[in-house]
Image (cartoon, rainbow, N blue to C red):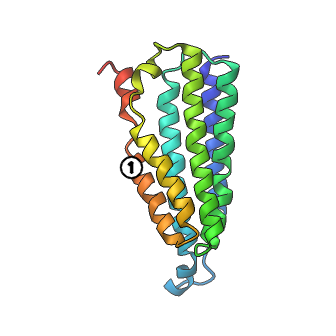
């Protein structure tokens, strides 16, 4: 199988995920700011999740540009990533509606950490398929950002049971760190 089909399928799933998330937003039951205020937590959860999905889509796009062969392992690990990403609309809606509750905030972090781990597995599967000297293997260096993100998610999950808003801030900080796409792959692809 060529990588074009993998890219098209992944792009389609991610588009559906974003569509489901936006459909979960409901119009205010009035035309003034007082009607908007109760919807603000759901809207902010949507914005945060939209940014996370966008980050995954951009980095996934860059990563797939390095792929020369698609193996069964790459297909299955890609599905594993898409599984975790597909749960984001559910946890976004739950956290948005119950923004002061610990469990939805912690579960949101659990989905985020599992998405990151599954992305790592996909990287490993691509490197195993394309070889230790592949473009992706050459582009990836230290995993500092990834490790900091994983530790931050773990801390946010625990802190959700202390103060959920602290976890929300950690999630936003992780998104801010990843907002700039990973330049290692792009630099390798362009010969920089």
At 50% from the left and 64% from the top, the residue drawn is 167
Quadrant of residue 118 within the rendered picture: top right
Q: Assign a secondary structure to mark 1.
A: helix
- Whether residue 43 is visible here, answered yes or no, is yes
Compared to residue 18, the image places residue 188 above or below, namely above
Compared to residue 53, the image places residue 104 above or below, namely below
Residue 9 image offset from top left, x and y in percent: 66, 32
State the residue in front, 33 or 130.
130
Residue 146 image offset from top left, x and y in percent: 46, 41
At 45% from the left and 42% from the top, the residue drawn is 147
- Whether residue 22 is visible here, answered yes or no, is no
In-image side of 145 versus 57 (left or right): left
Q: How many marks?
A: 1
Residue 11 image offset from top left, x and y in percent: 60, 37
State the residue in front, 165 or 22.
165
Residue lying farthest left? 192
Compared to residue 186, the image places residue 155 above or below, namely below
In-image side of 131 versus 81 (left or right): left
At 57% from the left and 36% from the top, the residue drawn is 119
Residue 73 image offset from top left, x and y in percent: 68, 23
> Which quarter shows the N terminus?
top right
Residue of label 1: 177
At 61% from the left and 70% from the top, the residue drawn is 102
> Which quarter shows the C terminus?
top left
Label 1: how many residues lie within 10 Å, few (<14), some (14-19) or many (20+)?
Answer: few
State the residue in front, 168 or 62.
168
Quadrant of residue 173 within the rendered picture: bottom left
């Amino acid at each position: 199988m060529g990588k074009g089909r993998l890219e098209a399928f992944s792009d389609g799933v991610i588009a559906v995920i974003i569509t489901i998330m936006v459909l979960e937003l409901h119009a205010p039951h009035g035309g003034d700011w007082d009607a908007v205020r109760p919807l603000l937590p759901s809207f902010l959860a949507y914005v945060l999740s939209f940014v996370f999905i966008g980050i995954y889509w951009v980095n996934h796009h860059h990563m797939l540009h390095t792929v020369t062969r698609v193996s069964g392992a790459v297909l299955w690990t890609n599905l594993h990533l898409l599984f975790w990403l597909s749960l984001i609309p559910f946890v976004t809606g739950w956290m948005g509606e119950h923004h002061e509750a610990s469990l939805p905030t912690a579960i949101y972090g659990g989905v985020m950490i599992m998405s990151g781990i599954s992305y790592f597995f996909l990287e490993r599967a691509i490197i195993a398929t394309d070889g230790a000297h592949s473009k992706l293997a050459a582009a990836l260096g230290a995993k500092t950002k990834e490790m900091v993100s994983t530790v931050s998610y773990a801390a946010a999950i625990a802190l959700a049971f202390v103060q959920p808003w602290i976890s929300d801030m950690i999630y936003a900080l992780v998104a801010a760190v990843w907002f700039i796409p990973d330049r290692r792959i792009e630099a390798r692809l362009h010969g920089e």
